[in-house]
Amino acid sequence: MKYSFSTSIYFPMPPPVVSEFVTNPWLFFNPTGHITVLKKITDEKWDICFNLHIDQSRGNAFYGTMDGPTKKGNDLFYAAKSNEDEINFVLKASFKTTPTGTDLELAFDVVTNYAFFDRFKGENFSLTPEHIIKRHLSERIPEILNIVNYREQGREFLLETANLSGAQAIPFLKSKARDIKNCIVIGTSKTMKFTIIVSNEQFDNINAESGNTQTFGGEAILDILNNTDIFLIGIYDVSASNQVRELVEKQYEKSLSA
């Protein structure tokens, strides 16, 4: 069975900002709860999990891979399928400039090849394009954009910046965690990008990305400490996205245990 849905979501910020967000599958898909990016394979290939949410207590899930973002002309494409081809999808995103911002135009097709799904229609089968866009992307993308694109929002979510080497950054951030208690830290250099979520003064959900290599937790901390580049570090308030962050964390844990 094929499900299709197209719509446009307005953002009061320029197309490059929205495009930067859409091309980050971790931020774009994970808040939906239905498509969870688990691991980066290459710059355009990812391990993912389809979360059906037919029965929240059972957590029906299918694992597979996703290709993208692939650029064709002015459009971006993601294509994914489960390992046994029970589910596959294609999502096209394009960006239309308006006088006050950007219209993100989405065309989303989901195809199911599994007899089990024939028993479920409408709201009972939540892995439909309409449900994902209307109930998740439309509601939660703006909250995340407010944080990761503070420049277009008057910097109200940016708490502090610093320029430090990796060896300097970790002690600095540990001291800041005691004061700020809950925040998101994003650091970028010429060779690495890292993200740390600080929850109740503790480092949580740490990841570091360098080229095609991605590390997590203690291994990511060591990679950051050993990096001699100068990082541009931003510390962001999470008050506007606590609900989204908790949803992503819970769904990620649920996907791994399914």
Image (tube, grey):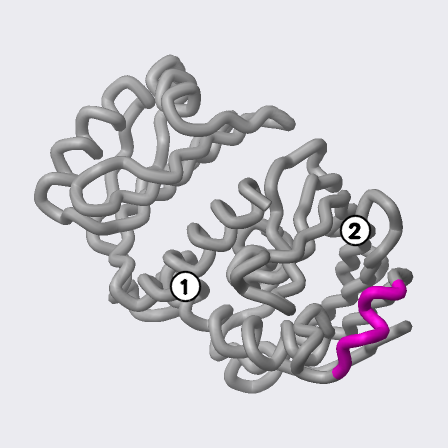
The answer to whether 180 appears left or right of 34 in the picture is: left
Q: Is residue 173 visible?
A: yes
The answer to whether 139 appears left or right of 95 in the picture is: left
Question: Can you tell which quarter of the image residue 158 is in?
Answer: bottom left
Front residue of 52/41: it is 52
Amino acid under disc 2: Thr
Against 135, residue 114 (above or below) is above
Query: CA gap, disc 2 to disc 1?
Result: 26 Å
Which residue is under mark 2? 70
Against 156, residue 38 (above or below) is above
Which residue is under mark 1? 244
**Image quadrant occupied by the N terminus:** bottom right
Q: Position of residue 136 (x, y in %)?
A: 55, 73
Question: Can you tell which quarter of the image residue 55 is in?
Answer: bottom right
The residue sitting at 59% across, 46% down in the picture is: 258
Q: Position of residue 203 (x, y in %)?
A: 27, 36
Mark 2 or mark 1, which has the lower sequence index?
Answer: 2
